[in-house]
Image (spheres, helix red, strand yellow):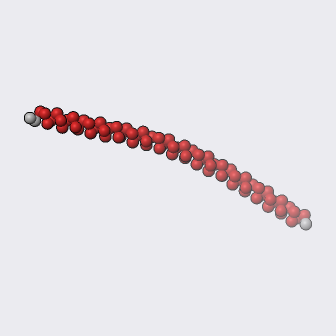
Amino acid sequence: MTASVEQQNTATIEISQNVAGAAQGTEMVVAVLGDLAGTATATRGSVETVLTASRSVESAVARLRSEVESFLGKVAI
C-alpha cells in the first residue's frame, strides 16, 4: 500500500511539473504572438505610409508630365 501511495505521489508531482512547464510554454507563445501582432500593426502603418507617398508621387509625376507636354506643345509651334 505504501509503495502505491508513493507511486501516486511521484506521478502527481510529475504531472504537476508537466502542467507547469506547459503553462510556461503557453505564456511564451502568448508573448511572442503579442509581439508579432504589434510588429504586424507597425508594418501595416508603414505600408500605408509608403502607399500614400507613392500615390502622391504618382500624382505629381502625372502633373509634371502634363506640364512638360503642354510646354513642348507650345515650343514646337
Residue at (47, 41) in percent of width and height: 45
Tell me residue 66's x, y (percent).
22, 37
Of residues 19 and 63, the one drawn nearer to the viewer in this rendering: 63
Query: Which of the 4 quarters of the picture holds residue 5?
Result: bottom right
Instruction: Please give the name of the residue rendered at 58% of the width and 48% of the height, measured from the top-left corner.
Output: 33
Q: Nearer the viewer, residue 23 or 50?
A: 50
Reply above or below: 58 against 22: above
Quadrant in the picture for residue 22: bottom right
- Asked if residue 7 is positioned above or below residue 35 in the image, the reply reads below
Counting from the top left corner in percent of width and height, residue 73 is at 14, 36
x, y percentage for residue 28?
Answer: 63, 48
Residue ID at (68%, 50%): 24
Residue 7: x %, y % from top left = 83, 63
- The relative height of residue 57 versus residue 19 in the rendered view (above or below) is above
Q: Residue furthest right?
A: 1
Q: Which residue is outermost to the left? A: 77
Image quadrant containing the C terminus: top left
Who's the residue at 61% across and 46% down the image? 31
**Marker count (numbered):** 0
Whether residue 20 sits left or right of residue 60 in the image: it is right
Q: Is the N terminus in the top left, top right, bottom left or bottom right quadrant?
A: bottom right
Horizontal side, residue 24 vs residue 68: left or right: right
**Front in this rendered view, residue 5 or 22:** 22
